[in-house]
Amino acid sequence: MIQLSRIGWGPVLPMVLVLSACGGGSGGGGNDQPEEQTGPQLSYDRNDLASKAVAITSSGGMESFQALRGDLQLTQYLLYEINAFSESMPVTNAGTYPCEGGGTVEFRWQETETTLEKTTSFNQCSFNTMTFGDVVLSGSTRYESALVGETATSASWKSSITDDLSGSIKFSGELFRFSGVIRMSDYLTESGGVTSWRYIRDVKTYERKLGNRYVAIADAQNRDSGTDADWEYEVRGTIVGSAIGGYVQLETLDPLEMSENVDGPISGIVKLSSNGEAEVRFGSSAGGTAKAAAVWIDGAVVESYEDWHEVGVVVYF
């Protein structure tokens, strides 16, 4: 029988593609001015980036998209470090504990055979991280999970993570903030000794700030399903970023097909949209125009890749 577990614990965010064929922010070609649109409602988007489309063209402008990828990675590392710190605390009972550099962290939870509710609250909690050195953290993160169905060969869960965290990095003085909710649905099935899984992640809004860097994930969903041998991945959502001066929308036209014996997608098509559109066609979906991946803009191939890593895929699970 499959037992209740906290599948998906930790920050789970959608896939983000950064393309060498895309111009972004002030670096792109194309139209003289980005289109203005009404975007998602965000609390910390001070420059209304969610309403500003950015140019996607075949001419240069890679730097701003590379910076967006860097901002996503950097803030993700900080989230991982925060989670690693709280998970490493030797906590056996609910209560308030001192942090290594001052301040406190409080753990509260309620647990039954089929549910778990856990809240971790930080009050000027100072601790050391491998990537950022000493940080000071306040706010809370809340995890909820419930087993909603179970048989001898299957199980399903509904979970969520709610973050409202803020703090500072001591050596640089940079302030940071994480705010948003991630909702998760997990399904497992066993048959003939093989476990099949399907994970769905929904994000209405999740915002990140670190110093002058701002990134938001909005109206996003990713779907991950298959077995350990073969699986597929789908994503849709909007990425808003200070690095590109606006937003890009992401959508899989055909799921990305993966195999444990192959490095990179076997097939699949991902579309980016903003002020212009681009398609990344992987493997067999490239129709012979590239060994690993090809970028299409306005119905024509503008980039071909022998190695899919060169396309700049960043995946968060």
Image (cartoon, rainbow, N blue to C red):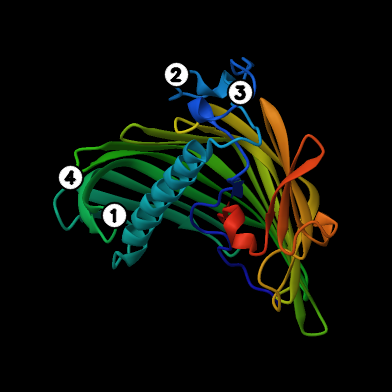
Bin the neighbour count of mark 1 within 10 Å (Cα to Cα): few under 14, some 14-19, many 20 and up: few
Q: Quadrant of residue 300?
A: top right
Q: Nearer the viewer, mark 1 or mark 2?
A: 2
Residue type, label 3: Ala
Give the vertical position of 72 relative to 42 (above or below): below
Question: Is mark 3 in CB contact (under 8 Å) with mark 2?
Answer: no
Query: Distance from label 2 to label 4 (Cα)?
Result: 26 Å
Residue type, label 4: Lys
Q: Is residue 17 visible?
A: yes
The x, y position of residue 230, in whole percent, is: 76, 72
Question: Is mark 1 in CB contact (under 8 Å) with mark 2?
Answer: no
Secondary element at tag 2: loop
For marks 2 and 4, the one nearer the N-term is 2
Q: Residue at x 45, y 30 (%)?
A: 242
Residue type, label 1: Gly
**Farthest left residue in view:** 102
Side of 89 where 276 appears, left or right: right
Residue bearing mark 3: 53
Residue bearing mark 2: 47
For marks 4 and 3, the one nearer the N-term is 3
Give the vertical position of 230 relative to 297 (above or below): below
Bin the neighbour count of mark 2 within 10 Å (Cα to Cα): few under 14, some 14-19, many 20 and up: few
Query: Distance from label 3 to label 2 (Cα)?
Result: 13 Å
Residue bearing mark 4: 170
Residue type, label 2: Asn
Q: Residue at x 26, y 53 (%)?
A: 132
Q: Which mark is residue 95?
A: 1
Bin the neighbour count of mark 4 within 10 Å (Cα to Cα): few under 14, some 14-19, many 20 and up: some
Give the vertical position of 29 relative to 137 (above or below): above
Side of 120 where 97 appears, left or right: left
The x, y position of residue 262, in whole percent, is: 70, 74
Give the vertical position of 199 relative to 28 (above or below): below
